[in-house]
Image (cartoon, helix red, strand yellow):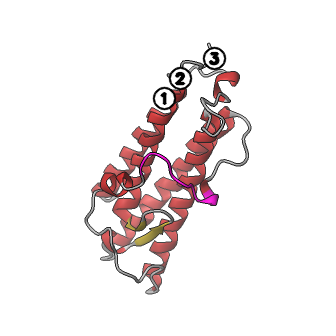
Amino acid sequence: MNSTIARLLDDVVQARARVVDALDYTSVVQAAFKPTPDAWCMIDIVEHLTMAERSGTFGLWKALDGMLRGAPVFTGEHTNRGRPIEDVIAEWGERVNVPAIAAPAWGGSLDYWVAAYHGGHTLLTSLGEALSRAVERGIALEDVISPHPISGPLDAVQRLEFLRAHAERHTRQILRVRGDVNFPA
């Protein structure tokens, strides 16, 4: 696998592990706790992470397939070219209107969503292999562009960095929920 892609994927794996570590020893009652009525509980957070990652990897794969066919899915101006993903995400602020495709809607068991989140690893690894083959064919990762519903065009490097940064953002959210004064014992 291409070394840049391998490093980016490893960063995602490490960030995903930190999400799961932040959830360690969470009871069923704690998993459903919401600090405020409009806040997300831990179940919502991990459902969102799972759905957002699936959507993001699908979009990136679709963009890669388009490049390989000579029909890119994005042909506009790459307004985020060269920008660190943290700068792109910083423009969001603290509260974001989550796209419907990634909004928590199912609820259920935290254990289910943690397992589903882990299940994305196979998809991500396969995507990394496909991106590596494309690089071997002369396609630059910066030319594989998949629009993000909030941030606009992101290239393959930015999309993979986004998965890491997004997991880190929601790890902090989980820790805030755990640290709430009303968090169940």
Q: Nearer the viewer, mark 2 or mark 3?
A: 2
Dot 2 corresponds to which residue?
A: 180
Callout 3 secondary element: loop
Report the front residue among 7 and 107.
107
Write the residue at 30% across / 72% down.
Answer: 140
Q: Which residues are magenta?
A: 93-101
What amino acid is at disc 2? Asp
| C-alpha distance separating marks 2 and 3 | 9 Å
Quadrant location of the C terminus?
top right
Dot 3 corresponds to which residue?
A: 184
Dot 1 corresponds to which residue?
A: 176
Write the residue at 32% across / 51% down.
Answer: 86
Question: In the image, 159: left or right of 7?
Answer: right
Write the residue at 57% across / 55% down.
Answer: 98
Question: In the image, 2: left or right of 102?
Answer: left
Label 3 packing within 10 angstroms: few (<14), some (14-19), many (20+): few
CB contact under 8 Å: marks 2 and 1: yes
Report the front residue among 157 and 107.
107
What amino acid is at disc 3? Pro
| C-alpha distance separating marks 2 and 1 | 6 Å
Quadrant location of the N terminus?
bottom left
Write the residue at 41% across / 60% down.
Answer: 159
Which residue is the extreme one toward the bottom?
70
